[in-house]
């Protein structure tokens, strides 16, 4: 069995499991699509992009309340999880988010997800 598909001795998830869990949530997929296209983003910008995509509206019509709601969910739930999985680097102080994955497995799954959702 390839190393990338094994469960780690410390009880951690395999690369495949981490990748699938990262992509299992729509907001995480959308933020990963954005980061894959742009390389990095700021939390405020990313939350507004997610609201626009989720609501199918323009950035100018997004309410501050909706943006803050998504921003809180990203900050407390999605970004820490993706950072734990080694997919992103998140600087909480600055709000900077950068895609850091280097796995061909993750890249392939991300591309397949994009194709299916387009």
Image (spheres, rainbow, N blue to C red):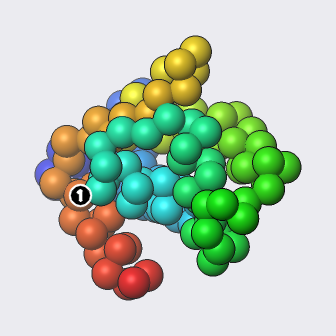
Can residue 7 be seen here? no
Q: How many marks?
A: 1
Tell me the quarter of the picture where residue 1 sits. Answer: bottom left
The location of residue 85, given as percent across then percent down, is 42, 38
Element carrying mark 1:
helix
Give the camera-side residue of 6 and 93: 93
Can residue 101 be seen here? yes
The location of residue 102, given as percent across then percent down, is 19, 42
Residue marked by disc 1: 107
Give the camera-side residue of 66 and 11: 66
Does 112 appear above or below 23? Answer: below
Residue at position x 49%, y 62% in the image: 30
Does residue 66 appear left or right of residue 74 in this picture? right
The location of residue 50, given as percent across then percent down, is 59, 59
Does residue 38 appear left or right of residue 24 in this picture? left
Does residue 27 appear left or right of residue 85 in this picture? right
Residue positioned most to the right: 65
Does 36 appear above or below 73? Answer: below
Residue at position x 63%, y 77% in the image: 56
Q: Residues within 10 Å of mark 1 (few under 14, many from 20)?
A: some
């Amino acid at each position: 069995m390839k190393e990338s598909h094994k469960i780690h001795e410390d009880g951690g998830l395999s690369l495949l499991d981490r990748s699938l869990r990262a992509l299992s949530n729509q907001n995480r997929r959308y933020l990963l699509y954005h980061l894959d296209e742009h390389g990095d983003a700021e939390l405020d910008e990313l939350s507004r992009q997610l609201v626009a995509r989720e609501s199918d509206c323009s950035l100018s019509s997004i309410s501050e309340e909706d943006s803050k709601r998504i921003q809180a969910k990203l900050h407390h739930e999605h970004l820490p999880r993706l950072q734990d999985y080694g997919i992103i680097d998140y600087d909480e102080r600055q709000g900077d988010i950068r895609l850091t994955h280097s796995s061909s497995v993750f890249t392939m799954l991300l591309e397949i997800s994009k194709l299916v959702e387009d």
